[in-house]
Image: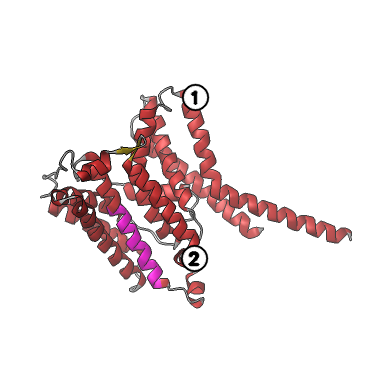
Amino acid sequence: MHAKDTAEEETAGAGRSERLSALAQQHGALVTLAVAMIAASLSFDTFLTGDNLENMALSSAFLAVVALGMTFVIITGGIDLSVGSLFALGGVLAAWASQYGAVAALLLPLAVCGLIGLVNGLLIARSRLAPFIVTLASMLGARGILLSVTDEGSKTYLVEKGSFFARIGQGSLLGVGVPVWITVALFVLGAVVLRRTRFGQYVYAVGGNEDAAALMGAPVARTKISVYLLSGLCAGLAGALNAAWLASGVTILGSGMELEAISAVVIGGTLLTGGFGFISGSLVGVLLLKVIQNVINQIGSLDSAYQQVVSGAFLAVVVIAQTWLGRRRRVL
């Protein structure tokens, strides 16, 4: 009887440890965000002001939309390096098309960036090419299209002030910018799709074990194509919203955004190896990166290079912690 009780206690202890490890992976970024915001609010009087919070929310919105699409890609075990260039291309195309109305300004970047994402997915899923190589080529190709459209970057397309498209980026609802509301709506929709639909189950299954997913009847190729299409659409939409906010298509934007999006997704608890991740975690990861950047700006004596150093160091710590937690769960 004593041996039986001991075995039951060990099993219960292992179960508790596994649940704690899972909670740490899922909510660790949220706890860190809360601690960072409390520390920042105590250290800087201007941190919790309305203007500062509004600026952080708006600047987070565009990266968050890109990170939303990236979350689906990474959960399948893939990677998308083209989103930064697609973000910039989407902004330029939206600004150019805004002369024909808001519908054209939104549809053109979605069509072009979505098409590039679709090509990425087809090459990766059907031709079985490495996602890193395919999306790297798309990154360079999209940047080339951008330079061609803008005459090597010398031409900047402007959005007419007061137009409906400009109001989408610059307007507010209940004191909160319209892009923020759009981002929140997209994340709610993304969470429902990932957690409550068959497609979401396929995304997790493909990332967890592609061969096993295929044996279970999951449409592996179609799922991969869909997530890269989604990533392209999200990047194009984020670029269009950014162009509406800035009232212009700025050609130099988007450089390094793919790395920021990947960092935010990983910090939010999604495993780079695939099969595990959360939509809400990616949003928390974006907010945490923006809080870190804002704190460095509040200090004033540090230049922007420190943002990259701190973000990189923080990402390294998160990846190490994820790896340790993942191994611990497998052992248990």
Q: Badge 2 local density, few (<14 within 10 Å), some, or many (20+)?
A: some
- Classify mark 2: helix, strand or loop: helix
Q: Nearer the viewer, residue 324 or 196?
A: 196
The answer for how far apart the CA atoms under marks 1 and 2 are is: 42 Å
Residue type indicated by callout 2:
Gln
Q: Nearer the viewer, residue 73 or 104?
A: 104
Sequence-first disc among 1 and 2: 1
Q: Badge 1 local density, few (<14 within 10 Å), some, or many (20+)?
A: few
The residue that appears at 67% across and 58% down in the rendered structure is 332
Tell whether 305 sits left or right of 160.
right
Q: Mark 2 sits on what residue?
A: 201
The residue that appears at 47% across and 45% down in the rendered structure is 316
Q: Nearer the viewer, residue 332 or 218?
A: 218
In the displayed orientation, state which residue is furthest to the right: 1
Give the quarter of the image for residue 139: bottom left
Q: Which mark is residue 42?
A: 1
Q: Which residues are magenta?
A: 221-236
Q: Nearer the viewer, residue 126 or 90?
A: 90
Say if 213 sits above or below 13 in the image.
below
Using the rendered image of the protein, determine whether residue 319 is visible from the camera's viewpoint: yes
The residue that appears at 13% across and 48% down in the rendered structure is 99
Q: Position of residue 36 (x, y in %)?
A: 49, 34
Using the rendered image of the protein, determine whether residue 260 is visible from the camera's viewpoint: no
In the displayed orientation, state which residue is furthest to the front: 174
Q: Position of residue 251 (x, y in %)?
A: 19, 46
Q: Which mark is residue 301?
A: none
Q: Position of residue 83 (x, y in %)?
A: 31, 54
Q: Nearer the viewer, mark 1 or mark 2?
A: 2
